Amino acid sequence: MSSRFPLLNERIYAPYKIAALVEVLAEQGISAEDSLSGSGIAPSQIDDASALTSVRQYVAVCGNAVRLSADPATPFKTGARLHLAAYGMYGYALMSCLSLRDYFRLGVKYHRLATPTLTIEWTECPDSAVWTFPDAFRSDLPHDIQQFLLEQQYTQHVTHLQDVAGKSCPPLRACFSYGAPPHARMYSQYLGCPCEFDAQQCELVYDSAILEFKPQLAHRHSAALLQETCDRLIGQAKTSSGASGEVYQELMRKPGEFPNMEAVADTLKMTSRTLRRRLEAEGTSFGAIVDDVRCSLATEYLKTTRMSTEDVAMLLGFSDVANFRRALKRWTGKGPGEIRQQ
């Protein structure tokens, strides 16, 4: 499973990550004005609950941190302060989920609500549960800023899992696709596990035995309510974001018909090649948006109507109910019956 996220300039995130980083830098004698220089954010905004910021603005503040701070522990300290309670609905949805398996799955599903700077994926293997970061070092950002973002991201994952589990739950190992930096000893100190450098890919590996563990704040009713809210927020983001938003709206305009990409591109007055290129620039694809629409409609039909599973499958364009069940399991981790009971 993987997460994709909105355009870098979209101002749709509360500035909690920026506030945490500015706080860490202030302890080093760096003023908020200097930390925020060139980001377009005023010091008064970082504690304003109504202020909205973009991923690009956050990356700009990270760039200032790399330039101004002499402490290599800055990204680790920031990640350790970003507890899930600071993430609003996203954080509370993860804390109330019913198992750590759900935590891993929902962490990916709702990642676009969390000022995402990196794509994350998770894979469940027989003996391990693995977070991977497939686009690490693939952007045009300088290497030191990308490394800063990755160091913070890893620390956030360790912090968040501890928040959910209610106890220390360290990874088995952390792997990095670059050579050991001068401050390599800090990695194991903050992540609580052995760290490997010059690895094939960036990944954080956990023992799969933890997946059945019940989070300390697990609550069935709260989990369902908060996940519905996150689904709604994700839907709002999709329907307002660039070309992907236009495609999403077009597909939802006639639910059940699912025109192909050429037909949608024609409706949007562009070629299918242009549409494909625009969607790729936004980190998504036509097929992924079709899956999102089908998932949203499937969930809505199963929860709010008495249609049989066979009828829902047919409405969504599946040739047989078995294919629909497999797709639903891939999208949500649940079967039709489990969704109806939520």
Image (cartoon, rainbow, N blue to C red):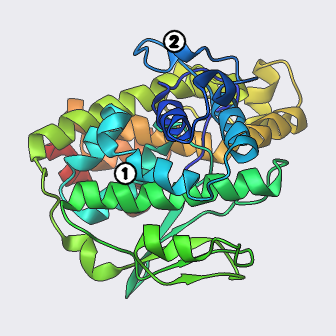
Q: Give the quarter of the figure containing the C terminus.
A: top left
Q: Is residue 140 above or below residue 132?
A: above
Could you tell me the amino acid type at mark 1?
A: Leu
Residue at which label 2 appears: 44
**Residue 251 at what x, y percent from top left?**
58, 28
Q: At x 30% / y 29%, what residue is drawn? A: 229
Q: Residues within 10 Å of mark 1 (few under 14, many from 20)?
A: many
> Where residue 165 sits in the image (x, y, percent)?
21, 62
Residue at figure coordinates x 65%, y 30% from the top left: 35
Between marks 2 and 1 in the image, the one whose residue lies nearer the viewer: 2
Q: Which type of secondary structure does the marked residue at label 2 adopt?
A: helix
Q: CA distance from mark 2 to mark 1?
A: 33 Å
Q: Residues within 10 Å of mark 2 (few under 14, many from 20)?
A: few
Residue 153 is at least partly visible in this image: yes
Q: Earlier in the sequence, mark 2 or mark 1?
A: 2
Farthest residue in the bottom direction? Answer: 127
Q: Which residue occupies the foreground of this view, 305 or 145?
A: 145
